Image (cartoon, grey):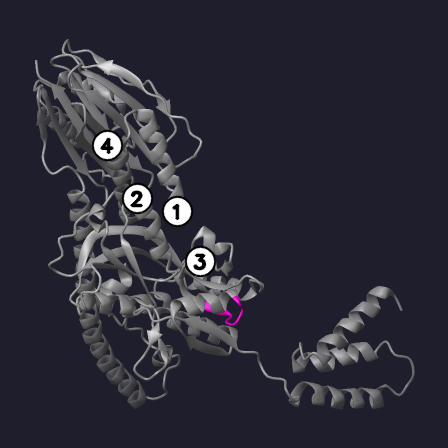
């Protein structure tokens, strides 16, 4: 007998003894093995082996029970919490119970405080931890599944009468935060980077944060957006405009175990997320928006025709009634869905108003200079921003920037970069030092690996000389008083957030009486018409040269009208931001 044949036989018997093959394979497998045996007494041997196989496969062995999968969670409604019946509930529970049923896992849930759950996971006392924010630092301690379940971010909550409006207002204030929470760690880093020193009060849960604020023992608390949205109104909390730390929520396992369970979770999550009517989206609607989607059970769909006219009429009549009832239920569900969408749109409008509130509130008229600006986000909120403010020594700082993303994450990143710039510009004198310091802050507080392009200029109002730097940004257009155009394309440097070792340089130019400077983002030059042609720098230059109104508002209106005429009905696909500065004649 060859080694290969011996290996096949050993594999079959090993699988049989370990009960790893089905009963219908047993007879065929044994027969195949017996066919190679010599002698005529095969039937007697075959019968004996089949009896033994029956005992091995169908009779339970003492102590042979499935190992349970111990799952830890902390109270964080509506994502995961203990229901009124004492059983775990929430979005994460819906998903993991569905996957567990598919895989045949025996799930055992354990609830504890967040800090205790992290300790248990690290000590391998639980197999999985639900509702945990992913970060590079944590990925070196735990295994994470790859498929994101939800995205969330942190928000500062206050009492209704609180005077706090900016992050600088939190200096020396008492802040309630959950110990070892990912948002608490991020807030400490942000506070350190902007130079404030709040007094942190560590708690065990988000609910304890709320109780401290209700009792007046802290000035502000940190809550995840989803948790705050679900409980903030009931607790008389005011949502502040201070948002930070966008994260991905996943599932974690101990580092000492393999990733087999997490791989199976990812497999099912990919299937669920690819089907818009799956349990994932129904649970998302029901838990986060209060919508229970109506899905017609399969057993209600007739698969055969009942014989006889009476049976056909009966089924048709019953089915008609069912459809009418389902239509009424679907109409109610549609009303709830519309209400939920309106609520979401309202939240985006609030986020947009918060973002607009971070921009300069008024146009600037300072000595011989006048500044006007506009920002048109492609979505409700975007990643472009501009700013202008005075500096010591009769100087003016003006800047325009573009975050390499869109939507709420880009807006949150934009707010952080804008804060870093305003603080460093007032603390440091040289433009090179300012950009180097801001680049370091962006990299140190940037787990999502986002970056931002930037033009920053510092104008001396006495000498009319401007020092500027291009950090990966489009060169501004300088329209001279003799109707000639210059591109301020010197001092090219890397974008902020790419490399901590980046070197930043600067160049200078002088603004004469009647000169106009236009700063813009790539949403202007890359605006596209229905023929998929770009607006481009050449059309922008022609538009500026044709403009008859040499005022900041006139130049901005001229470019805006030119873009509208060029793009026509083609939708805006990127944020459009412009800032115009003119020196009077």
Q: Who is closer to the viewer here, 303 or 367?
A: 367
User: In this rendering, which labeled residue sits more in front, label 2 or label 4?
Assistant: 4
Q: Cα distance, mark 4 to mark 1?
A: 27 Å
How many numbered callouts? 4
User: In this rendering, which labeled residue sits more in front, label 2 or label 3?
Assistant: 2
Instruction: Please indicate whether residue 16 sits to the left or right of residue 465 in the image.
Output: right
Residue 229: image quadrant is bottom left
Is residue 443 in view? yes
Q: Cα distance, mark 1 to mark 2?
A: 10 Å
As drawn, 313 above or below 77: below
Mark closest to the chain's N terminus, 4 or 3: 3
Q: Cα distance, mark 1 to mark 3?
A: 15 Å
Is residue 274 in view? no
Which residue matches tag 4? 426
Residue 349 at x, y percent in the picture: 17, 51
User: In this rendering, which labeled residue sits more in front, label 4 or label 3?
Assistant: 4
Mark closest to the chain's N terminus, 2 or 3: 3
Mark closest to the chain's N terminus, 1 or 2: 2
Q: Looking at the image, which residue is at 18% across and 31% down?
A: 388
The local secondary structure at tag 3 comes to: loop
Which residue matches tag 1? 448
Instruction: Please indicate whether residue 141 sits to the left or right of residue 7 in the image.
Output: left
Rate crowding at label 2 as few (under 14), some (14 to 19) or many (20 or more) other CA atoms within 10 Å.
Answer: many
Residue 347 at x, y percent in the picture: 19, 56
Rate crowding at label 4 as few (under 14), some (14 to 19) or many (20 or more) other CA atoms within 10 Å.
Answer: some
* Residue 147: mark in rendering: 3
Range of magenta residues: 123-129
Mark closest to the chain's N terminus, 2 or 4: 2
The local secondary structure at tag 1 comes to: loop
Instruction: Please indicate whether residue 224 sits to the left or right of residue 365 in the image.
Output: right
Which residue matches tag 2? 413
Label 2–label 3 contact, CB within 8 A: no
């Amino acid at each position: 007998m060859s080694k290969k044949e011996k290996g096949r036989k050993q594999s079959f018997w090993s699988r049989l003894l370990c009960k790893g093959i089905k009963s219908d394979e047993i007879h065929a497998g044994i027969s195949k093995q017996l066919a190679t045996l010599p002698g005529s007494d095969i039937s007697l041997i075959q019968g004996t082996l089949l009896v033994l196989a029956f005992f091995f496969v169908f009779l339970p062995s003492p102590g042979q029970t499935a190992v349970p999968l111990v799952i830890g969670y902390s109270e964080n409604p509506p994502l995961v919490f203990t229901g009124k019946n004492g059983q775990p509930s929430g979005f994460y529970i819906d998903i993991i119970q569905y996957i567990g049923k598919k895989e045949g896992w025996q799930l055992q849930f354990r609830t504890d405080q967040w800090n205790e759950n992290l300790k248990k996971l690290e000590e391998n006392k639980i197999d999985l931890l639900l509702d945990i924010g992913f970060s590079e630092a944590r990925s070196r301690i735990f295994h994470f599944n790859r498929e994101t379940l939800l995205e969330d971010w942190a928000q500062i909550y206050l009492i209704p009468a609180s005077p706090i409006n900016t992050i600088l207002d939190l200096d020396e204030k008492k802040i309630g935060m959950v110990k070892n929470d990912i948002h608490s760690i991020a807030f400490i880093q942000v506070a350190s980077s902007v130079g404030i020193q709040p007094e942190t009060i560590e708690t065990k849960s988000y609910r304890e944060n709320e109780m401290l604020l209700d009792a007046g023992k802290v000035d502000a608390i940190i809550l995840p957006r989803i948790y705050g949205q679900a409980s903030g109104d009931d607790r008389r909390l005011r949502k502040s405009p201070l948002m930070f730390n966008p994260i991905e929520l996943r599932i974690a396992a101990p580092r000492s175990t393999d990733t087999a369970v997490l791989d199976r979770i990812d497999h099912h999550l990919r299937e669920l997320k690819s089907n818009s009517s799956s349990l994932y989206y129904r649970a998302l609607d029901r838990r986060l928006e209060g919508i229970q989607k109506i899905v017609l059970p399969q057993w209600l769909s007739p698969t055969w025709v009942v014989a006889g006219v009476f049976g056909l009429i009966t089924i048709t009549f019953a089915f008609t009634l069912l459809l009418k009832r389902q239509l009424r239920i679907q109409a109610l569900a549609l009303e709830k869905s519309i209400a939920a969408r309106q609520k979401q749109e309202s939240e985006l409008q609030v986020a947009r108003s918060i973002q607009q509130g971070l921009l300069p509130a008024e146009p600037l008229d300072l000595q011989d200079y006048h500044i006007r600006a506009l920002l048109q986000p492609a979505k409700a909120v975007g990643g472009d921003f501009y700013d202008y403010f005075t500096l010591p020594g009769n100087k003016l700082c003006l800047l325009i920037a573009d975050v390499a993303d869109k939507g709420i994450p880009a807006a949150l990143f934009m707010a952080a970069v804008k804060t870093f710039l305003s603080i460093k510009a007032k603390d440091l004198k040289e433009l090179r030092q300012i950009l180097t310091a801001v680049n370091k802050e962006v990299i140190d507080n940037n787990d999502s690996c986002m970056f931002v392009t930037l033009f920053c200029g510092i104008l001396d109002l006495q000498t009319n000389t401007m020092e500027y730097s291009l950090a990966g940004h489009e060169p501004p257009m300088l329209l001279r008083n003799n109707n000639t155009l210059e591109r301020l394309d010197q001092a090219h440097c890397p974008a902020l957030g790419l490399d901590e070792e980046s070197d930043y340089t600067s160049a200078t130019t002088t603004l004469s009486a009647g000169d106009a400077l236009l700063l813009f983002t790539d949403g202007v030059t890359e605006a596209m018409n229905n023929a998929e042609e770009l607006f481009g720098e050449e059309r922008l230059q022609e538009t500026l040269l044709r403009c008859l109104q040499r005022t900041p508002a006139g130049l901005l209106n001229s470019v805006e009208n030119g873009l509208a005429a060029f793009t026509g009905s083609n939708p805006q696909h990127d944020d459009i931001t412009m800032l115009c500065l003119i020196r009077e004649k």
